Image (cartoon, grey):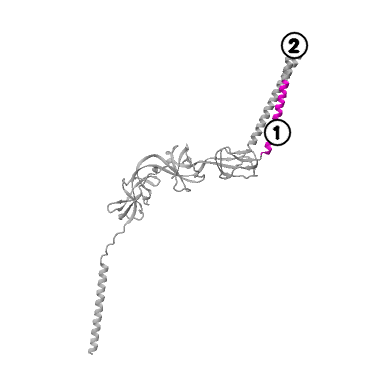
């Protein structure tokens, strides 16, 4: 009996000891869970900033167009004939007056020979008539002397005078025949020259539509020549911007073939009327192309500098945040923190944009990292290269 009671007491003591250990562990875990977490050091976001500054800007009109050669000529024969020789091929440079195509001229050379022979005959006949005229003149002079001395008759004198008149008339007829033969010879020579097709301009062969031995039809294009020293694009300006257009307006032109390169041209023609359907006016822009980098058919992006330059506050375009209203992050305070600020913008000048309100000179705006930063967040500032107007970079190709 006593042994059983002692076992029961020992069991109760063990249970109480286990409960006490569990309770202590539970209270300790609860205390740790409810304790305030220790603050972690904040992680700074590194951002790149640029300083808003005054710079000369001008309004720009962005347009698109297609490049075309300033001069393009299709070489066409006036008469038909077989192509005897072809002197040029695609891409060859040619000078003004250079022989391009020689058509078969054998029959025309024969025509020139016949015309020359006919001229020789008429000239010989003219010389014979001149001799007859001279003889008639001597006969008349002799009859005049005989009449004065009483040895000649008036009938003989009249016959001599008539013979001289006939001789002079025959000379005029032969002279007309000579002129006709000379004209025929000249026509034959010109027709012979027309079988030689020469270049009227200096340029490059852009297309060849014939091969040696082909039959060339009259007025069919055989060769195309383009002058690439200057290329042209025609842009269509809307009615709102048309008033700003004028001759000699500077245009910056870019093409996809040379990314990052800018070509400079000028407005050479402004259409005096607008299209009644599209309400746009044609504006021609000529671009010097001394290195022949620009090719006809290239897609061109044109930026026209309209209006006069003005001093204005500018920031990099990369500082703008996406949204319905323009905004930027400005770095303020010590330590530096990001402050979101709404702004008003004006003209865009390449990689710079004009700020008309919302910023002051020397304000620092975030250009790199502005998509990651939050309003009021502390940042680590990295200075970026100061923005410069595109005008100071030079207007020639970069």
User: x and y percent of residue 77 in the render?
Assistant: 62, 39
**Rendering coords of residue 370 (x, y %):** 35, 53
* Outermost residue to the left: 2
Relative to 85, does residue 375 appear above or below in the rendering? below
What residue occupies the far bottom of the structure in this picture?
1
Whether label 2 touches label 1, CB < 8 Å: no
Q: Quadrant of residue 200?
A: top right
Look at the image and give the residue range highlighted in magenta.
105-133
- Few, some or many residues within 10 Å of mark 2 (<14, 14–19, 20+): some
Depth order, front residue of 289/358 = 289
Per the image, label 1 sits on a secondary structure element best described as helix
Expressed as whole percent of the image width and height from the top left, the position of residue 351 reads: 39, 47
Q: Is residue 136 above or below residue 118?
A: above
Q: Secondary structure at mark 2?
A: helix
Q: Is residue 137 magenta?
A: no
Horizontal side of residue 40 vs 170, given as left or right? left
Q: Nearer the viewer, residue 365 or 88?
A: 88
Which residue does the numbered mark 2 point to in the structure image?
147
Residue depicted at x 73% and y 12%? 145
Most common secondary structure along the magenta stretch:
helix
As for residue 125 lying within the magenta part, the answer is yes
The residue at which mark 1 appears reads as 114
* Mark identifier at residue 133: none
- Judging depth in this view, the residue of 297 and 185 nearest the camera is 185
- Quarter the C terminus occupies: top left
What is the spatial separation of the Cα atoms under label 2 and label 1, in whole angstroms? Answer: 50 Å
Left/right of residue 269 with respect to residue 193 in the rendered view? left
């Amino acid at each position: 009996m006593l042994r059983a009671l002692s076992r029961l007491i020992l069991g109760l003591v063990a249970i109480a000891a286990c409960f006490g250990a569990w309770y202590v562990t539970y209270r300790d875990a609860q205390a740790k869970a409810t304790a305030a977490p220790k603050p972690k050091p904040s992680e700074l976001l590194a951002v790149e900033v640029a300083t808003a500054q005054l710079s000369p800007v001008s309004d720009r009109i962005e347009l698109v167009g297609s490049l075309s050669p300033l001069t393009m000529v299709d070489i066409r024969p006036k008469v038909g004939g077989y192509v005897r020789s072809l002197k040029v091929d695609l891409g060859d440079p040619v000078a003004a007056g250079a022989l391009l195509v020689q058509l078969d001229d054998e029959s025309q050379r024969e025509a020139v020979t016949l015309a020359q022979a006919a001229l020789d005959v008429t000239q010989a006949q003219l010389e014979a008539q001149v001799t007859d005229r001279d003889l008639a003149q001597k006969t008349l002079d002799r009859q005049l002397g005989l009449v004065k001395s009483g040895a000649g008759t008036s009938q003989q004198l009249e016959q001599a005078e008539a013979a001289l008149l006939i001789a002079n008339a025959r000379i005029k007829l032969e002279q007309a025949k000579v002129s006709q033969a000379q004209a025929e010879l000249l026509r034959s020579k010109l027709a012979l020259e027309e079988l030689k097709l020469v270049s009227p301009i200096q340029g490059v062969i852009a297309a060849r539509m014939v091969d040696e031995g082909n039959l060339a039809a009259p007025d069919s294009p055989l060769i195309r020549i383009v002058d690439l020293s200057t290329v042209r694009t025609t842009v269509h300006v809307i009615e709102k911007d048309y008033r700003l257009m004028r001759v000699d307006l500077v245009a910056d032109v870019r093409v996809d073939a040379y990314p990052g390169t800018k070509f400079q041209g000028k407005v050479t023609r402004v259409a005096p009327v607008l299209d009644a359907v599209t309400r746009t006016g044609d504006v021609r822009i000529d671009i010097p192309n001394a290195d022949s980098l620009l090719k006809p058919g290239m897609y061109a992006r044109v930026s026209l500098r309209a209006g006069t330059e003005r001093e204005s506050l500018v920031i990099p375009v990369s500082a703008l945040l996406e949204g319905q209203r323009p905004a930027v992050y400005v770095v303020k305070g010590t330590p530096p923190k990001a402050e979101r600020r709404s702004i008003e913008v004006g003209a865009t000048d390449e990689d710079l944009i004009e700020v008309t309100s919302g910023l002051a000179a020397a304000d620092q705006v975030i250009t790199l990292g502005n998509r990651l930063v939050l309003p009021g967040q502390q940042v680590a500032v990295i200075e970026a290269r100061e923005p410069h107007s595109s005008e100071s970079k030079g207007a020639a190709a970069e």
